[in-house]
Image (cartoon, helix red, strand yellow):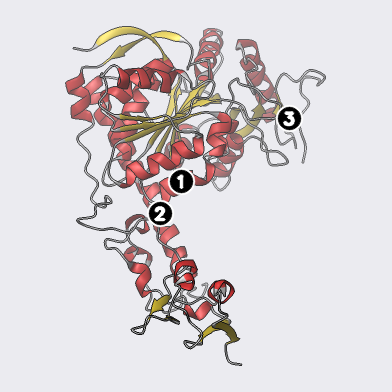
Amino acid sequence: MSKRVVLEASHAVAEAVRMADVDIVAAYPITPQTHIPERLAEMVADGDLDAAYVPVESEHSAMSCVLGSAAVGARSFTTTASQGLVLMHEALYIASSHRYPIVMAICNRALSAPINIWCDHSDVMACRDTGWIQVFCQNNQESFDMTLWAFRVGEDPDVMFPVMVNLDGFILSHVTEPLILPDQDDVSRFIPEYHYRLALDPAKPTSHGCFGLPDIYTEVKYSQELALRKSRSVIDKGWKEFSNIFGREYKAVETYKAEGASTLLVTMGSLGETAKMVIDERRANGEAVGHLNLRLWRPFPFDEFRDAVKDVKTLAVLDRCYSFGGPGGPVASELRSALYNQETRPHVVGFIGGIGGREVDAQAFGYMIDRANEITEKGSDDLYEPLLVRGLESGTGVRG
Amino acid sequence: MAKNQVRPSALPKWQDCEFGNILPYAGGAKEYKTGDWRTDRPIVDASKCIKCGMCWLMCPDACIVQTEGGTYDANLFYCKGCGICAQICPKDAITMVEEGA
């Protein structure tokens, strides 16, 4: 029987990892992810989870450890945030290139300096091109659900890629909310036993980590790129199966009150919930506004995104990360790039805010809608507009 | 119309690449000739060799081999010419000579 419980998102993720029956957890604690490995270590110590728990000496070791366990075919989980994620960086590519379906929960946090333990998306955006499947969660239930889904999709023989599950540091990781925990039998049905045909085995040797000379590297990398793009169909199938078994529906691009909307607020992660509240208020006032939640970041859902915005005039996009000296935040500039060659396309207005834990409240989202509409009307050469910076006049953009 | 950018080749196509570049067998490095990276070649004077095995121990590849007489020689299929064997030899029995010289 499924049951309704009250858990913080970190413990919800740990619960999902337990129900997925992982073989190994290797993790190094870092704020705000600490409660995930802490809870998993407890579960292993108490005998509630039959897995090896490896208390590694760094995040680089954590990733290296799960690379090894994935190579022998063990279901492997790790989790980190911020500096820990960027310390793992070089090993992240090894996981995706070798097609090891490791699952990693990231409690998104700002990067140093200045040192800051609070939420933004700088950590995961620095890992955008590592070849991992990347999803974002808006609340605790989604954090649980996406963790289960990550094992199902990553281990699919037609996918075999590692998956990053992103949940906002503190805002989700440390916040307690009600959620539904499913029945173990349903979870076991959703995530079948995993067999890795190329597992390291002295009886049937395979070579992992082979050299790729200039005469083959180009072909190897193209096959990897194509495989990640082709995983889209299984990603969607995974959500369909999830909804058939557990009743909750997820999509790569999710819209809210977008029917007939001329302006959409675009967010990733937990701020979607605040944005939707603002949309409710504006809709009640008769304004044609809606919300777009970009759940899947890699592989990027081009078709669904273009389709969702085809009748829209303005996109007001929130980025929780800088791309220093670049074209604006990574999300806004990718959306712009996804639309550039389309015959008709909305005006993309980028905002960078909510960094290092700075609150983006209803008033700020209201401002984004009004300001984006104004820019669509009047035009602007600005690359993006920084949000809530003391000392900046409202409406001051950054130019190239 | 742009000209075809692909050149004919007998090498594997992207469709033929191994999954994850993982080979379904072991010992592939045995087939790989690293000897053509070399600029200097080790020449062993077996009469000076005291069979201490230091060159065999220190060689970073698998190229120093023991001969039937118990002295050592270099397998030039693998030898990259690093010169560590010549450096470590306590009897200066190994000399590095430039290839083609």
Q: Chain of mark 3?
A: A
Residue linked to disc 3: A378
Q: Residues within 10 Å of mark 3 (few under 14, many from 20)?
A: few
Task: Name the chain under label 2.
Answer: A
The mark nearer the N terminus, 3 or 2, is 2
Residue ID at (43%, 67%): A216
Q: Quadrant of residue A344?
A: top right
Q: Height in image: A88 above or below A106?
A: below
Closer to the eye: label 3 or 2: 2
Residue at image coords 51%, 75% = B80
Which type of secondary structure does the marked residue at label 3 adopt?
A: helix
Mark number, residue A131: 1
| Label 2 sits on residue | A224
* Mark 1 burial class by Cα count in 10 Å: few <14, some 14-19, many 20+: many
Marks 2 and 1, how far apart at CA: 8 Å
SS for callout 2: helix
Q: x, y percentage for residue A396? A: 78, 26
Label 2 close to label 1 by CB (< 8 Å)? yes
